[in-house]
Amino acid sequence: MGNDTNIWSDILSKMRLKRCVYCFAYLGIFLTLSAQIVMRKRVFYIAWIVTSVVMFTLSYCWHGLILNDLKNLQYPIEMYLLLASILYLVLGFCIAFLYNYLNFSRNIPFKGSLLGSFVGFFTYLIAFTLGVSFGGSGLKHVMVDFIWQMLEQGTGGLAASAVFTFSAKMKKLLS
């Protein structure tokens, strides 16, 4: 009878040890995955902000410095800058999200620029439909605005692509 108790206690202690090993293994897997998720989120946030800043800067240079459109605003410049910054944060989020979470079956060169141009195309369609514009409404003006919007968002997509590519190369280099 005493021998049976030792066998059961040995079995239980081995099961506890096995559970403990499994718990540590699961904890290690969880910590590894959560570190990867946190890093992926960090890279996403960096790409989002870099993309937004690049597009906002290009917009300000185009409308404020090259075309001098901002001096003809019907409302305060501070309001325009606030609304434009919110818009570019939303556009930057869309581009970074699309770049990060869309899977293509093959590696497409300049994927970020293509996605950015796609976002720029639809952004301009919305602005054109709502009648939001700085200048005239002639065909030449519409085409220049349309091309500029696609170039601006395409450059933002290129910035997102650069951040994600740099992060992937650094991760590969460090591992």
Image (cartoon, rainbow, N blue to C red):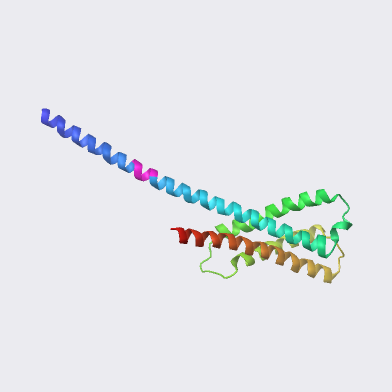
Residue furthest out toward the top:
1
Task: From the viewer's side, name the closer residue of 63 and 104.
Answer: 63
Which residue range is magenta in the image?
23-27
- Residue 61 visible in the shown view: yes
Q: Position of residue 80 (x, y in %)?
A: 81, 51
- Residue 102 visible in the shown view: no
Q: Is residue 66 left or right of residue 170?
A: right
Q: Looking at the image, which residue is at 45% across and 49% down?
A: 33
Q: Position of residue 11 (x, y in %)?
A: 20, 36
Residue furthest out toward the front:
174
The quarter of the displayed image where residue 3 is located = top left
By secondary structure, the bulk of the magenta-drawn segment is best described as: helix
Q: Position of residue 14 (x, y in %)?
A: 23, 38
- Tally of marks: 0
Q: Quadrant of the C terminus?
A: bottom left
Q: Is residue 154 above or below residue 90?
A: below
Task: From the viewer's side, name the closer residue of 42 and 113.
Answer: 42
Q: Position of residue 130 (x, y in %)?
A: 80, 57
Task: From the viewer's side, name the closer residue of 146 and 42.
Answer: 42
Q: Is residue 141 left or right of residue 168?
A: right
Q: Is residue 83 above or below residue 171?
A: above
Q: Is residue 55 left or right of residue 23?
A: right
Q: Is residue 27 left or right of residue 129?
A: left
The question of residue 71 being in magenta is answered with no
Q: Quadrant of the N terminus?
A: top left
Q: Looking at the image, which residue is at 58% across and 60% down?
A: 163
Q: Is residue 119 above or below residue 14?
A: below
The question of residue 24 being in magenta is answered with yes
